[in-house]
Amino acid sequence: MLLNLTKFNLYYIMNEKGDIMPNTPAAKKALRQNKKRKERNKKTKKGLKALIKDTKSLIAEKKFDEAKEIFRKVQAKLDKATSKKILKKGKINREKSRLAKKIAPLDSH
């Protein structure tokens, strides 16, 4: 079973199950690279979520110094994720802004 004739079809075919299978060496390599990138991106996203969660919990527990320190790390990691295009810039800016709003009142303490 093949897809409609497009550039996509030149490099991939479908097996009996309907899964897309690479047909050329370049497509096979691209598939391997995509799997590696997916795993790496997944790991990075989980780490970022954990850091953001830690920051929010420290703010709730009113541990101001620790929250500020982790917030700096979170900002750096979020910016790095943006530069590597793991997450979109708008989402990163939104997360940083929300955390900054929660941390801003802590500066007066």
Image: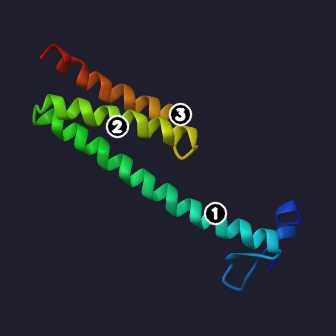
Can you give x and y, in whole percent of width and height, for residue 19 in the image?
67, 76
Can you give x and y, in whole percent of width and height, for residue 98 in the image?
33, 28
Image quadrant of residue 108?
top left
Image quadrant of residue 23?
bottom right
- Residue occupying image coordinates x 48% and y 35%: 79
Q: Which of marks 2 and 3 is nearer the N terminus?
A: 2
Disc 2 on helix, strand or loop?
helix
Query: Of the residues tagged 2 and 3, which is closer to the observer?
Result: 2
* Residue at which label 3 appears: 89
Residue 18 appears in the rendering: yes
Give the residue type that dot 2 points to: Lys
Q: Earlier in the sequence, mark 3 or mark 1?
A: 1
Give the residue type that dot 3 points to: Lys
Residue 3 appears in the rendering: no
Left or right position of 31 against 90: right
Query: Of the residues tagged 1 and 2, which is closer to the observer?
Result: 2
Can you give x and y, in whole percent of width and height, for residue 14 in the image?
75, 77
Image quadrant of residue 60?
top left
* Residue at which label 1 appears: 34
- Label 1 neighbourhood size at 10 Å, few (<14), some (14-19), many (20+)? few
Q: In which quarter of the image is the N terminus?
A: bottom right
Can you give x and y, in whole percent of width and height, for residue 49 in the image?
34, 47
Q: Residue 73 carries which label?
A: 2
- Label 2 neighbourhood size at 10 Å, few (<14), some (14-19), many (20+)? some
